[in-house]
Image (cartoon, coloured by chain):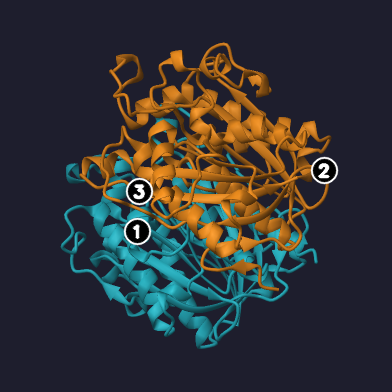
Chain colours: A orange, B cyan
């Protein structure tokens, strides 16, 4: 049975169910707009670990185990874990998974990783290869900042277009059956690179990739934007979000009424996050917290979640390369 | 239909076919033992690119396009590309994929990436989500050396246990039908970390992960080592290979007659590679070259290929962490 639709989309035959989620955030995220939707809020960004990287790793291990415990499963019921983070060689993920002890597939999609894991995990379930998988992703502001930009303690002034990497992690348990929203469709993104080179302005770099995947999702699935109660991108921030709306306007499509970006939902105006939140954890914590609860409470019925990733490295920036970007989408229906 | 077997293995219902492969290597690999099995040998490690990273990227783009052309397909026939490399944020892969223009899923499994891509790609095909995928991986000695260890020009003396990162890239086209060896089974690895901390000795660090995956493959599938004409690990080198044989001996299993490591097959004794070859390209070029041809010519009928990955980073090493390792396996039958 061919489940491929159009150029880059999938319609699941037996849509997998998101049976549980868990998340954890740092103190700044805990002071933000979605505080009531987090399972745990750290009081500082180390949480008794000896490095920020170890703290990030501990967060991921905690959300994976907590998401599984929440639905009264045992960790050994999990067939595969699919996860990734922003650190070089997925440092947080690998040490987290050492503590989880389950078969593991490492992914790198920058901030699109959470959705990439949900997407591949859903194919493993619908394809008959697994009964239960966990998709997880994490980021840590301080660890990401010193890896990608400047020594964190230096406190370099950030331009207003920049976004604030989220400290947090989210995990979703996806099962062959159970209660919860179903993943009914997915769209795999292509690399889109419009030539932008400023690693402080990732929202504008990623917006065309998000728009491309969204466009192909509608074209491949035959669904219209109005099919979804809400469409969420992962971490475009206010500048990138405005660009996506603008790009669709040029195609005669109005996205302004049912589209939001997770990066615009996390921090309050006075928290100085500038253009919004970013990082693997941006879409991971908003989805596993706010969006998942809205679906479970049937306040939302159909959601399209688009993970957005800026795929540059410090080396590619130093070699004056532009920023390749990607976006993957999953359709969630209750 | 449940295609999961045991704790971490898969038996494919309609085994996907490897319909084409391509590879490219640097000059040192071209002077090595398997020269006749490479599609293209570069005369220097830059090949007219302005950096080693760009050269690695160009190699991957070339093997993906060449593997597709070889089987007389068009690049648009490829549903998804699954690929990764060793560089921070998969730099080579992302710029290669920018030139390929197909839907893309980024993977990080260090030197296990080629097999991870073949494994996930096979589930996409057998699950009905794709008709044709490409799995690819690359590494570049000079780019990896300066990222993981010392400035390449410095020429630091290497300990005898160290391995030489392969400069090269390999790609495999996997299709729902066609001629070629079939991927009949697969085993997904768990993180195995025995506490070793020396990033110059990756073979010994990875050997227990390879043995663990091998052991579970036999247990899950009910197959014995003798089922396979040959069992190949990815890049354990001479030290790691001896350890795998030793680990199986303690379980009363003799692997010495039909087991080899790709890392021991690439360089000649006098090429100063010390304990052998390593890098994503080690298993990628040996599989896409030598092994694939042996299967096509029916000199080998059943092969188990185990990608082995050392998942440390420079940061994890500096934070005095041990090396988490992983190994994934695919069974190839002609």
Whether residue B120 is visible here, answered yes or no, is yes
The residue indicated by pointer 3 is B160
Identify the residue at image location x=57%, y=11%. A43
For the C terminus of chain A, give its image quadrant. top right
Q: Which mark is residue B98?
A: 1
Residues at marks 1 and 2, CA–CA distance in whole angstroms? 39 Å
Residues at marks 2 and 3, CA–CA distance in whole angstroms? 56 Å
Whether residue B274 is visible here, answered yes or no, is no
| In this rendering, the label closer to the viewer, 1 or 3 | 1
| In this rendering, the label closer to the viewer, 1 or 2 | 2
Q: Where is residue B270 in the image (x, y as percent from the top left)?
A: 27, 64
Give the mark, 1 or 3, whose residue is nearer the N terminus: 1
| In this rendering, the label closer to the viewer, 2 or 3 | 2
From what the image shows, is residue B319 above or below residue B92? above
Residues at marks 1 and 3, CA–CA distance in whole angstroms? 39 Å
Q: Position of residue A183 (x, y in %)?
A: 69, 51
Q: Position of residue B14 (x, y in %)?
A: 69, 76
The residue indicated by pointer 2 is A179
């Amino acid at each position: 049975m061919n489940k491929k639709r159009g150029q880059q989309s999938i319609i699941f035959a037996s849509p997998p169910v998101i049976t549980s989620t868990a998340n954890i955030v740092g103190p700044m995220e805990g002071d933000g707009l979605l505080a009531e939707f987090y399972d745990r809020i750290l009081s500082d960004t180390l949480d008794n670990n000896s490095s920020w990287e170890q703290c990030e790793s501990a967060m991921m291990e905690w959300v994976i185990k907590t998401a599984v415990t929440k639905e009264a499963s045992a960790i050994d019921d999990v067939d595969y874990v699919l996860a990734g983070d922003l650190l070089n060689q997925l440092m947080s993920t690998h040490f987290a998974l050492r503590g989880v002890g389950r078969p593991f597939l490492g992914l790198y999609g920058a901030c699109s990783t959470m959705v990439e894991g949900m997407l591949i995990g859903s194919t493993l379930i619908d394809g008959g290869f697994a009964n239960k998988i966990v998709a997880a992703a994490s980021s840590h502001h301080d660890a990401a900042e010193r890896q990608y930009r400047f020594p964190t303690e230096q406190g370099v002034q950030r331009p207003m277009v920049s976004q604030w990497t989220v400290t947090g992690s989210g995990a979703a348990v996806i099962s062959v059956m159970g209660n919860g929203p179903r993943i009914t469709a997915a769209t795999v993104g292509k690399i889109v690179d419009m030539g932008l080179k400023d690693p402080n302005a990732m929202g504008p770099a990623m917006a065309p990739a998000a728009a491309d995947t969204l466009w192909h999702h509608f074209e491949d699935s035959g669904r219209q934007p109005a099919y979804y109660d809400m469409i969420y991108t992962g971490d475009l921030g206010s500048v990138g979000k405005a660009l996506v709306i603008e790009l669709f306007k040029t195609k005669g499509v109005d996205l302004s009424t049912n589209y939001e970006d997770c990066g615009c939902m996390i921090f309050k105006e006075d928290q100085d996050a500038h253009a919004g939140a970013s990082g693997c954890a941006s879409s991971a914590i908003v989805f596993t917290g706010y969006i998942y609860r809205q679906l479970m409470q049937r306040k939302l019925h159909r959601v399209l979640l688009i993970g957005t990733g800026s795929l540059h490295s410090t080396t590619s920036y130093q070699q004056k390369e532009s920023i390749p970007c990607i976006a993957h989408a999953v359709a969630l229906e209750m």
